[in-house]
Amino acid sequence: MNVHASVPATGKASSDQPMLVAEHVDLYYGAAQALYDVSLTARAGEVTALMGRNGVGKTSFLRAVVGEQPIARGTITLNGVSLGRMAPHDRARLGIGYVPQGRDIFPLLTVKENLETGFAPLARNDRTIPPDVFDLFPVLADMLKRRGGDLSGGQQQQLAIGRALVTRPKLLVLDEPTEGIQPSIIKDIGRAITWLRQKGDMAILLVEQYFDFVHELADRFAVMDRGHIILTGTREEMDPDKVRRHLTV
């Protein structure tokens, strides 16, 4: 597999039935409302980008999807299964792979041990590291015995994505994967996302503020402001200047 070859911007045709469906989602932190009537879908074989300034509700929506924060109203389904108040580990078993902002790798564990933490939601016979992880991020294969805390920020981000891929996700959720990362590794991450999308069996939900990175990757866009979805559309439908205005302070 040559994941570094030039690839077209559009992946395989997606199913008519979205992998992820969120409808009319409200979310609160105590008395403070963070999400208002948020609806969003993500399809297999596509990248859905959720964009907006800091503090507008993007991470809150991801927390609702992965089960870290309960929703007050609305529904979220994965491949037709209602997530309800399902715990995060049960959502992982159902097929949600999460790469949080800040990476959250285990600094004292080796790279190999960090990857193996992805075994938790898998059946015993599936507890192997897929070769795709090392095809996409060869540096990890060279650093299996190094501690996670000794890696650079970019290498830790690759490790966090690799750990999520170990779980064989149907939905890969990425929260600002380019934050604080050097340009060369941003390109590697972009090529990896493109390859995963082109496989056609995984939906990718990408939260990001780096517009040029997202514009090359995403099939569909949603832009948030103050807890609301205010713009949606395909790459062809979205006005880049209008999107950028909602990303600047």
Image (spheres, grey):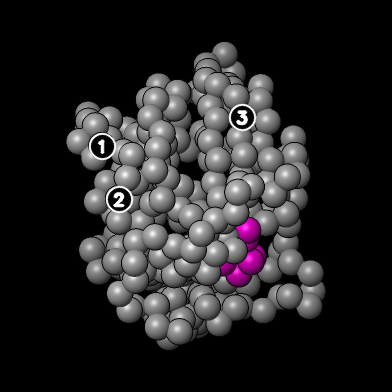
Q: Which residue is mark 3?
A: 23
Circles 1 and 3 in contact, beta carbons < 8 Å: no
Looking at the rendering, the stretch of residues picked out in magenta corresponds to 165-173
Q: Is residue 98 visible?
A: no
Of labels 1 and 2, earlier in sequence is: 2
Answer few, some or many: residues within 10 Å of disc 2's Cα (few below 14, many 20 plus, some between 14 and 19).
some
Q: Quick one: label 1 or label 3, which is nearer the N terminus?
A: 3
Q: Is residue 28 above or below residue 16?
A: above
- Which mark is nearer the camera, 1 or 2? 1
Q: Is residue 1 above or below residue 54?
A: below
In which quadrant will I find the N terminus? bottom left
Q: Residues within 10 Å of mark 1 (few under 14, many from 20)?
A: few
| Location of residue 249 (image quadrant) | top left
Find out whether residue 166 is within the magenta segment: yes
Residues marked 2 and 3 touching at CB (< 8 Å)? no
Q: Of the numbered discs in the image, which one, if any, rests on residue 239?
A: 1
Amino acid identity at mark 1: Asp
Residue under pointer 2: 215
- Residue 223 drawn in magenta: no
Number of the front mark, 1 or 3:
1
Question: Disc 2 residue type?
Answer: His
